[in-house]
Amino acid sequence: MTSFPRPRTSGTTLEPGGASPDAIAARTRALVKTYGRGDAQVRALDGVDLEIEQARLTAIMGPSGSGKSTLMHCLAGLDTPTSGEVSVAGISLGSLEDNALTRFRREHVGFVFQAYNLIPTLTARQNVLLPLELANREPDWRRFDQLVEVLGLADRLTHRPPELSGGQQQRVAIARALLSSPDVVFADEPTGNLDSRSSAEVLGFLRRSVDELGQTVVMVTHEPTAAAYADRVVLLRDGRLAGTLVRPSADDVVAAIAGLGV
C-alpha cells in the first residue's frame, strides 16, 4: 500500500487557533471539565476555545494529562462538560437529552479507536455495515464500493477480524466510520497498535478521506510522524490551548512539544 502525506509548506510557526465562521465543523467555547471533588479535584480542561475546520485533518497533541483525550470525548459527545459549550454541525450538544445525543452521534459522528472495536464473529463487510443496520438505514452502496476500493479491502470482506492484520482491521474500522458520511470522524490514537508500515497506510487513508472525500477528521495522537499528516495541530498543556501548528513536519511538531517545556 502507498501512503499519501499532504505536501508541506516551509516556515511553519506557532499560530493562534481559529477558522472562518463559514467553515466550522465543531467548536468549543469556555470548555471546562473537572473530575473529583475538593482537594482531589482535577481540572482536565480549563476554558478551551477551539474551532475545528471542515474538510481538514486536525491533530490534537500534548503531554500525558494535558486533556487531549478529554477534549476529543467532549467534542464527540462521549463525555459531558462541567461548563462551557460544545457544538458539532451547528448543533449544541448541551441542548440534547440522552436519547437525542445517542441519535446525534449515530447520524453525525464517526469513530476510529486504537483498539479497532470490531465484532470478532462478524465479517469485515458486516462490521462496516453494522452501524447503519442498527440505525435501520440503507447504505450508500456507491460510497461503500468506493471505500472498499480506496482502502484495499475488496479481498478481505469475507474475513473475520481474527483473520486480518492490525492494519487491515483498522482499515475496516475507518470504512465503518466513513460509510455514513458523518460530519466529523474522531480518531483516538488510531495507529497506536500498528507497526510503522501499517501506520503509514492508515494515516494515508485518513489523509485521502479529507483530500478526496471532503471528510473532517479530528485525531488524538502522541506521535509527531502521525501529526505531520494533519493540516493543523492543536497543542494542549494543563487543559489549556497552548498554540497551533499549520501543516507541520514531524520535526516542527517535536520542536513545538519541546517548547512546551515537557
Image (spheres, helix red, strand yellow):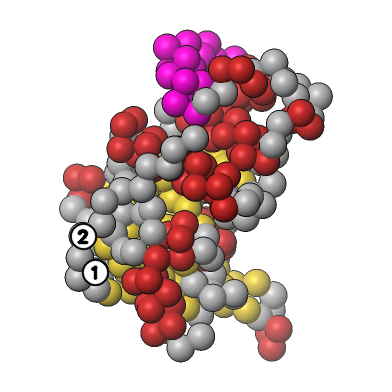
Which contiguous range is marked in magenta?
135-151
Res. 156 visible in picture: yes
* Dot 1: element: loop
Q: CA distance from mark 2 to mark 1?
A: 7 Å
Residue named by callout 1: 12
Say the numbered circle drawn on residue 9.
Answer: 2
Looking at the image, residue 28 sits to the left or right of residue 141; the answer is: left
Instruction: Mark 2 and mark 1 in contact? Answer it, CB < 8 Å.
Output: yes
The residue shown at (76%, 28%) is 163
In the image, residue 105 sits, relative to residue 126, either above or below, namely below
Res. 28 visible in picture: no
**Res. 63 image quadrant:** bottom right
Query: Residue 107: x and y, percent?
Result: 49, 29
Looking at the image, residue 228 sits to the left or right of residue 99; the answer is: left
Say the numbered circle drawn on residue 47.
Answer: none
Query: Residue 98: x and y, percent?
Result: 61, 41
User: For mark 1, does the 10 Å Cα neighbourhood hold few (<14), some (14 to 19), or many (20 or more) residues?
Assistant: some
| Kind of residue sitting beneath label 1 | Thr
User: For mark 2, does the 10 Å Cα neighbourhood hold few (<14), some (14 to 19), or many (20 or more) residues?
Assistant: few
| Kind of residue sitting beneath label 2 | Thr
The residue shown at (49%, 72%) is 62
Query: Residue 148: x and y, percent?
Result: 51, 21
Residue in front for this viewpoint, 209 or 186:
209
